[in-house]
């Protein structure tokens, strides 16, 4: 094997081992044009956002002082919640809305910002995470 390829192969083996041990999840990029997907790299998410926070040296009290460091943890947490629910819910909220017809009341996208906004259709909102706890 080429000496330059060896570190990349070892890295790939380590990553595969972490995936098999359910430590990380590889999230492939999504693009409408399949050729664009080939040049994009997947995102890696720790399955346990608490472990990721510990490895990033973050504590609960850092939420206010080091808020810029929590975006990736929020993204990881939300991803894991969506994956956990994927088995019993529809994966596309708009498709679910179409299937439910008049019985569909709405859907929410959670973000780390400060404002709630509509996402085109007034039944779809982007809502700050803090609203979940009434902050």
Image (cartoon, rainbow, N blue to C red):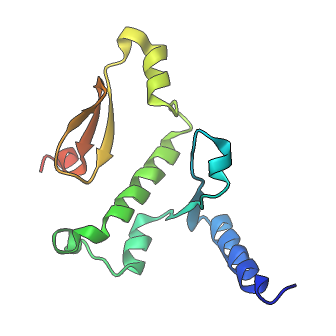
The residue under the point 64% across, 65% down is 19
Q: Nearer the viewer, residue 111 or 80?
A: 111
> In screen coordinates, is 7 left or right of 114?
right
Q: Nearer the viewer, residue 18 or 92?
A: 92
Farthest-out residue, right = 1
State how many labels appear.
Answer: 0
Work out which quarter of the rendered image holds the N terminus and state it. bottom right
Farthest-out residue, top = 102
Farthest-out residue, left = 135
The residue under the point 46% across, 65% down is 48
Q: Is residue 130 depicted above or below 105 in this figure?
A: below
Q: Nearer the viewer, residue 13 or 49?
A: 13
The residue under the point 24% across, 71% down is 60
State the image coordinates of residue 22 (x, y, percent, origin top left). 60, 64
Figure quadrant of residue 73: bottom left
Q: Is residue 123 depicted above or below 36 in this figure?
A: above
State the image coordinates of residue 78 (x, y, percent, origin top left). 40, 51
State the image coordinates of residue 92 (x, y, percent, origin top left). 50, 31
State the image coordinates of residue 107 (x, y, percent, origin top left). 34, 30
Q: Is residue 7 depicted above or below 135 in this figure?
A: below
């Amino acid at each position: 094997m080429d000496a330059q390829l060896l570190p990349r192969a070892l890295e790939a083996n380590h990553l595969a081992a972490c995936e098999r041990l359910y430590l990380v999840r590889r999230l492939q990029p999504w693009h409408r044009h399949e050729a664009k997907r080939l040049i994009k790299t997947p995102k890696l998410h720790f399955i346990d956002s608490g472990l990721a926070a510990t490895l990033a040296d973050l504590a609960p009290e850092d939420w206010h002082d080091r808020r810029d460091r929590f975006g990736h943890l929020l993204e990881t947490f939300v991803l894991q919640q969506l994956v956990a629910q994927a088995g019993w819910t529809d994966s596309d909220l708009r498709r679910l809305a179409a299937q439910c017809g008049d019985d569909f009341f709405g859907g929410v996208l959670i973000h780390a910002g400060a404002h709630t906004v509509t996402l085109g259709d007034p039944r779809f909102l982007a809502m700050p995470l803090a609203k979940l706890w009434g902050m």
